[in-house]
Structures are given as C-alpha cells and as structure tokens.
C-alpha cells in the first residue's frame, strides 16, 4: 500500500495510454479531456513543451508526456487526447495516446512504485495499481514539473491564482 493513499479508501483515476503502457491520474486533478489540437510553438521552451493552446480564452501550455518521460516518440492518432490538469494554481494540458476510462480503485490494490517503472523515474509515480490482470502506473502530478518549470509554465499561460 502506498503512503500516498489512505487505507481502505476508493479512489478514481482517469486512465490513459502512452505507447503500450496504461497510466492513471487522480480524477480530482482533471478539468477536462479534449481532442488533440494544433499548438502554437513557444520559442526557447523546454523540449517537452509542445506549445500553447487557447482554451475558451485561457492560454494553456501543453506537455508532451512521451517527451517528458523520455519515451519512444510515435505519431499521435485520432485517439490522442489532451487532458487538462489542475495542479495547485497551475493549469496545463498533457498529450497522451488515448484516454480509455475512469476507474475506481481501492487503495488496498495500490503498491508502492518500484525505483524504475517502464523507464520512468519513480519520482513521478505514486504507486502501481493492480486491476485484474492489468497494472496501472499512477502518476504524481504534483511532481510532474519542478517549481521552476511550474513558474515557467505559469509565465506562458494566463492562469489566475
């Protein structure tokens, strides 16, 4: 059982794919899910920043999760989505291959993350959930970006505190 979750609680995660692996993020941090759209490139931004989009008047920075996690880069298909995430007062989007479902997972089915999972540093992971025969890598969105990167993204966008 991971120290991030209270014992015996049921949690909801938005499940998405990157390559052949499934990941989960807490539904409480997901604002919305949109089809992949063209981004506007931002000069001198980090390699994992795909660009920015205008979402109903709010400028949202978009992170390519494959680049963030240094995973093999493949073309996004029609199933690709942008998951709009809220972490504290920061709003940003993450590009993923597809979003499949919202899952309820009991905290007793979540194990601590091994040091390296699928080549991703365990720093980004809160645990691994066992869902039937599937293993779901649960991401810690608060650690997805460093404080410096959050400030930089804030400067790209037009978030309100």
Image: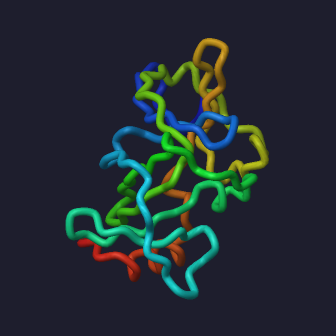
**Where is residue 4 shown, x and y percent of the image?**
52, 39
**Where is residue 82 shown, x and y percent of the image?**
43, 52
Q: Is residue 107 above or below residue 126?
A: above
Which residue is nearer to you in this view: 32 or 114?
32
**Furthest residue to the left?**
57
**Furthest residue to the bottom?**
44
**Where is residue 26 shown, x and y percent of the image?**
43, 40
Q: Is residue 105 above or below residue 20?
A: above
Residue at point 35%, 61% (across, down) = 88
**Furthest residue to the top?**
132
**Where is residue 140 shown, x and y percent of the image?**
54, 48
Q: Is residue 24 above or below residue 38?
A: above
Q: Quadrant of the C terminus?
A: bottom left
Which residue is nearer to you in this view: 4 or 11?
11
Q: Quadrant of the N terminus?
A: top right
Q: Is residue 23 left or right of residue 94?
A: right
Q: In which quadrant of the rendered view does residue 33 lie? A: top left
Q: How many marks?
A: 0
Residue at point 60%, 77% (across, down) = 46
State how the image is colored: rainbow
Residue at point 21%, 63% (across, down) = 56
Q: Is residue 72 left or right of residue 153?
A: right
Residue at point 54%, 65% (across, down) = 145
């Amino acid at each position: 059982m991971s120290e991030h979750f209270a014992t015996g609680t049921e949690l909801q995660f938005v499940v998405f794919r990157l390559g052949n692996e499934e990941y989960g993020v807490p539904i409480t941090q997901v604002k919305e899910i949109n089809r992949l759209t063209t981004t506007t490139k931002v000069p001198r931004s980090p390699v994992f920043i795909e660009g920015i989009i205008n979402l109903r008047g709010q400028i949202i920075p978009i992170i390519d999760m494959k680049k963030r996690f240094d995973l093999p880069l493949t073309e996004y298909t029609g199933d690709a989505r942008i998951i709009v995430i809220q972490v504290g007062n920061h709003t940003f989007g993450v590009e993923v291959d597809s979003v499949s479902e919202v899952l309820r997972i009991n905290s007793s089915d979540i194990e601590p993350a091994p040091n390296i999972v699928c080549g991703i540093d365990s720093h980004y992971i809160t645990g691994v959930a066992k869902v039937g025969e599937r293993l779901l890598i649960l991401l810690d969105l608060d650690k997805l970006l460093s404080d410096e990167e959050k400030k930089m993204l804030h400067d790209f966008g037009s978030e309100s505190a």
